[in-house]
């Protein structure tokens, strides 16, 4: 008797992909979310076989319960039984535009909420993010997740493998099983005979790409309600397609099959696209103000608020509820359609409100934590105004700080540190503050006092503001109205506003730095697209006015003013730039600080033009084939030239790429880096010119007439506020070096620029015996990066996280201000791994492999 061939199993996973805000606002989408989940509850009550995956996130559940709180117990039963799967994320993020710590907090919060409802989906489900970072495998494994389901970024890999499944290895060697939705995450069952041939083609394509012998069919799409007649439809399909057995399951069910088969190994970031799925690289410059605000709030939370709150926790003050609230607000903005700037104008206005709320919390908590710490510190001079300064970097540092203080007499004053050393300060402005809120509020102006502080590693130092006395003035850094010079650099500004940088240590000379390039953009929020008749305008030949803006004992600043005359917009047919011109005034501030190897640049621009892209350029002359860019927990080397464009692409390979804090080029032992605050898009040419995008103005959410992409990426809504009209400020820095970035101090220079010191005036009397200068944590050697210092998630101890973005293993140490009572290595989710031997007292030795992230949880015996 002939054997009946076994049927191929098709695992059908009902799901909905829920963009919280996009072409509708959050509240508009929430109305439809409530309708969808109301239906889900009814279906689940009537059919115990019902399953639904809620898009790998937990925030939609909370949004629903804010309207339907009476449904919480029903939802908890569905989650506990596995019929409704939620998490592991809080919200579906973009990975390239948010920090590594933000991704970890996203997973921490998603897990916390999912556990509250009884169960968390332990699969890395990220169906619609616009590419994936190289460190995602390690991040997921840090939460006990060994699988990930994706769609974008793996087109070329799947094509080369001939399969849609592989083993993905991160820089540290962490591995996860990957399933790529090669046919999309938004699949549907045929409803009539005309749809059967297309469905058969989809099944054949899924069979071809599968390594397990089974097929994964993600049933659902954007904002889709649960299917009411699912099981009847599947029974009908069994008859129509007798070679297949259709069963309702989950991504976890398919993950079990994936773990059992041998898979080819893949390394590196997943940003290859173009043939089947867009990766939409223009999102890194869309609505640049959002990217700047995001970087600023992340910096406040990670570099100031959390470390200071951790020390305040050891002083007996728990500020973590406020910190958690700020993180929740920030993470709500990290949904991919939100942070990417690809929604309607109302969505991004609401995002700016969330950023404002999160930053207000972060600033208030950081200042309060500093006051708590300051109360416990000795004050060697009782006659002046005490000022406390905090250095967020884990090494000793000299840097300018600006502190709001009671107005001194005159524009100059002295500050005295704990050793009696005098420092000259300058009043650079004033601002109204409201203080003593609970004791009868006082509204008063305070002076903004600037001075250069010498600070301990990740610690605080007390200064006392005194009346001005005669002190010896150091030589000015301002040589003349066009020239600055410190120990490391000489900067000479030319007549068109570009400048020459002379590295005094190496003798290298870089000319023509800082010119501006403007080009037409006929694209949309997703993609840059040049018009057919492109016209590129640069600042070369502009007549610039140069004057001295600041001449302080520790700092010199030149102010450069010029005007770019730009086409007002595009022609009526959008094929060329208009002949009508508008003036866009630009002011560039170039600064050097004494003792600091870094050139600081601030750009202020009045954008009066439409449909264009503005970039600042630094021609280094260092010819190269690759550029180095800081990525999440890693520094990535990317080729300068994109993949060769061939027939069949639906999105042209982009020459622009994402960065975190810096991009660098190197050639024959010389290097040049551009550091930024919230400017995530760069391009590097083969001649070594580094372009950083300052803004990109467009008027459409999506268009279908782009030269760089075929078809729409979203609905064709007009978005006039995405033109980014009005005043902007951009902040960058330059750093030159010998050797490689790994050995030349670039990591420290970048972190120092991103997170300057902060200070606060203290009130009241001292209440403790801490020294007037105290470093809480020191990390050595260079190459290791401190990622987090925070209160532990369970509230019992302090968590420290470090990582190694270099290509070599680094042996180092963390030194604390006092010996911990207990310490242990943990996963990223802070679950314990191994106890740490504390025989070295306040020093913990550590060995960190290339690309590795290590987390330590500590407990101290007593509070300060």
Image: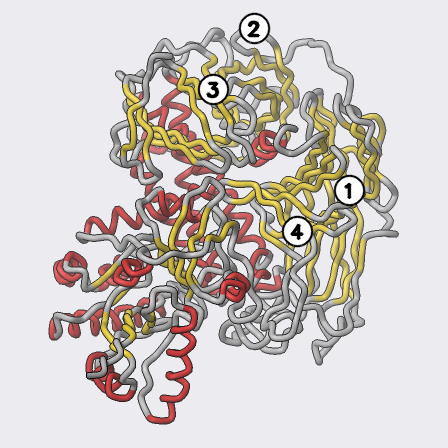
Distance from Cα at disc 1 to Cα at disc 3: 40 Å
**Residue neighbourhood size for the residue with mark 4, other residues' Cα within 10 Å, grouped as few (<14), some (14–19), many (≥20):** some
* C-alpha distance separating marks 2 and 1: 47 Å
- Which secondary structure lies at badge 1? loop
User: Does residue 403 appear to the left or right of 8 in the view shown?
Assistant: right
Screen quadrant of the N terminus = bottom left
Going from N to C along the chain, the mark reached first, 4 or 1, is: 1
Query: Could you say which disc has been placed on residue 420 in the image?
Result: 2
Question: Residue beneath label 1, please?
Answer: 622
What count of labels does the image hold?
4
Q: Dot 4 corresponds to which residue?
A: 639
Q: How far separated are the C-alphas under marks 4 and 2?
A: 53 Å
Residue 141 lies, in percent from the top left, at 36, 45
Element under disc 4: strand
Which of the marked residues, 3 or 4, is nearer the chain's N terminus? 3
Residue 254 makes an appearance in the image: yes
Single out the mark in the foreground, 4 or 1.
Answer: 4
Residue 447 x/y as whole percent = 56, 28
Kindly state the secondary structure of the residue where label 2 is placed: loop
Neighbor class of circle 3 (other Cα within 10 Å; few <14, some 14-19, many 20+) is many
Q: Answer with mark 2 or mark 1, whichever residue precedes in sequence.
A: 2
* 3 and 4 marks in contact (CB < 8 Å): no
Q: Quadrant of the C terminus?
A: top left
Marks 2 and 1: CB-CB under 8 Å? Answer: no
Residue 738 higher or lower than 575, as above or below: above
Q: Nearer the viewer, residue 200 or 130?
A: 200
Location of mark 3 (residue): 460
- Comparing labels 4 and 2, the label whose residue is closer to the camera: 4
Instruction: Give the foreground label among 2 and 1.
Output: 1
């Amino acid at each position: 008797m002939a054997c009946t061939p076994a049927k191929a199993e098709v695992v059908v996973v009902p799901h909905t992909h829920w963009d919280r805000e996009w072409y509708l606002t959050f509240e508009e989408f929430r109305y439809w979310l409530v309708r969808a989940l109301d239906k889900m509850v009814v279906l689940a009550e009537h059919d115990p076989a019902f399953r639904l995956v809620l898009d790998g996130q937990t925030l939609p559940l909370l949004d629903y319960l804010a309207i339907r709180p009476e449904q919480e117990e029903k939802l908890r039963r569905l989650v506990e039984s596995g019929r409704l799967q939620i998490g592991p994320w809080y919200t579906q993020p973009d990975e390239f535009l948010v920090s590594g710590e933000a991704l970890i907090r996203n997973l921490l919060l998603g897990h916390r909420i999912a556990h509250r409802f009884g169960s968390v989906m332990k699969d890395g489900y990220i169906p619609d993010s616009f590419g994936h970072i190289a460190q995602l495998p390690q991040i997921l494994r840090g939460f006990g997740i060994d699988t990930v389901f994706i769609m974008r970024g793996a087109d070329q890999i799947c094509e080369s493998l001939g399969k849609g499944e592989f083993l993905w290895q991160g820089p540290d060697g962490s591995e996860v099983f990957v399933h790529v939705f090669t046919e999309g995450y938004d699949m549907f069952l045929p409803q009539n005979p005309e749809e059967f041939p297309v469905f058969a083609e989809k099944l054949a394509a899924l069979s071809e790409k599968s390594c397990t012998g089974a097929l994964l069919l993600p049933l659902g799409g954007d904002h889709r309600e649960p299917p009411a007649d699912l099981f009847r439809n599947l029974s009908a399909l069994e008859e129509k397609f007798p070679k297949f057995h259709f069963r309702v399951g989950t991504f976890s069910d398919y993950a079990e099959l994936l773990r059992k088969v041998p898979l080819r190994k893949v390394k590196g970031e997943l940003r290859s696209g173009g043939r089947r799925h867009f990766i939409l690289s223009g999102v890194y410059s869309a609505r640049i103000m959002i990217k700047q605000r995001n970087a600023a709030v992340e910096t406040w939370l990670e570099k100031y608020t959390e470390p200071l709150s951790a020390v305040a926790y050891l002083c007996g003050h728990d500020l973590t509820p406020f910190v958690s609230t700020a993180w929740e607000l920030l993470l709500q903005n990290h949904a991919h359609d939100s942070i990417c700037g690809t929604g309607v104008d109302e969505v991004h206005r609401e995002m700016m409100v969330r950023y404002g709320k999160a930053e207000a919390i972060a600033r208030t908590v950081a200042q309060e934590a500093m006051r708590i710490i300051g109360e416990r510190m000795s004050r060697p001079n009782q006659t002046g105004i005490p000022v406390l300064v905090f250095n967020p970097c884990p090494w000793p540092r000299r840097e300018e700080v600006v502190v709001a203080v009671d107005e001194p007499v005159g524009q100059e004053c002295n500050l005295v540190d704990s050793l009696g050393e005098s420092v000259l300060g300058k009043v650079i402005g004033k601002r109204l503050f409201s203080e003593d809120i609970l004791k009868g509020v006082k509204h008063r102006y305070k002076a903004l006092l600037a001075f250069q502080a010498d600070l301990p590693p990740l610690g605080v130092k007390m200064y006392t503001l005194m009346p001005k006395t005669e002190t010896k003035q150091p030589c000015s850094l301002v040589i003349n109205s066009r020239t600055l010079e410190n120990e490391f650099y000489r900067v000479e500004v030319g007549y068109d506003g570009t400048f020459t940088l002379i590295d005094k240590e190496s003798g290298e000379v870089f000319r023509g730095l800082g010119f501006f390039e403007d080009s037409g953009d006929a694209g949309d929020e997703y993609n840059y697209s040049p018009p057919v008749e492109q016209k590129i305008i640069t600042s070369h030949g502009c007549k610039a006015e140069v004057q001295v803006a600041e001449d302080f004992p520790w700092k010199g600043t030149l102010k450069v003013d010029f005007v770019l005359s730009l086409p007002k917009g595009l022609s009526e047919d959008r094929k060329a730039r208009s002949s009508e011109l508008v003036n866009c005034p630009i002011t560039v501030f170039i600064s050097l600080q004494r003792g600091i190897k870094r050139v600081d640049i601030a750009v202020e621009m009045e954008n009066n033009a439409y449909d264009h892209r503005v970039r600042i350029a630094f021609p280094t002359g260092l010819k190269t084939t690759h550029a180095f860019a800081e990525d999440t927990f890693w520094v990535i080397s990317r080729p300068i030239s994109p993949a060769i464009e061939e027939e069949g692409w639906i999105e042209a390979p982009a020459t622009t790429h994402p960065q975190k804090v810096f991009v660098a080029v190197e050639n024959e032992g010389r290097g040049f880096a551009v550091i930024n605050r919230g400017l995530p898009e760069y391009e590097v040419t083969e001649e070594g010119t580094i372009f950083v995008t300052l803004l990109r103005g467009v008027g459409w959410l999506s268009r279908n007439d782009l030269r760089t992409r075929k078809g729409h990426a979203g609905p064709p809504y007009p978005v006039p506020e995405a033109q980014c009209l009005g005043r902007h400020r951009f902040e960058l820095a330059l750093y030159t070096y010998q050797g490689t970035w790994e050995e030349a101090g670039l990591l420290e220079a970048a972190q120092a620029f991103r997170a300057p010191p902060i200070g606060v005036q203290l009130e009241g009397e001292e209440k403790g015996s801490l020294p007037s200068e105290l470093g809480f944590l020191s990390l050595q050697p260079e190459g290791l990066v401190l990622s987090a210092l925070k209160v532990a998630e369970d509230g019992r101890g302090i968590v420290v996280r470090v990582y190694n973005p270099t290509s070599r293993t680094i042996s180092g140490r963390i030194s604390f201000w006092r010996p911990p009572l207990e310490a242990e290595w943990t996963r990223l989710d802070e679950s314990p791994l191994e106890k740490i031997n504390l025989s070295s007292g306040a020093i913990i030795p550590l060995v960190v492999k290339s690309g590795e992230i290590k987390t330590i949880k500590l407990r101290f015996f007593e509070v300060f």
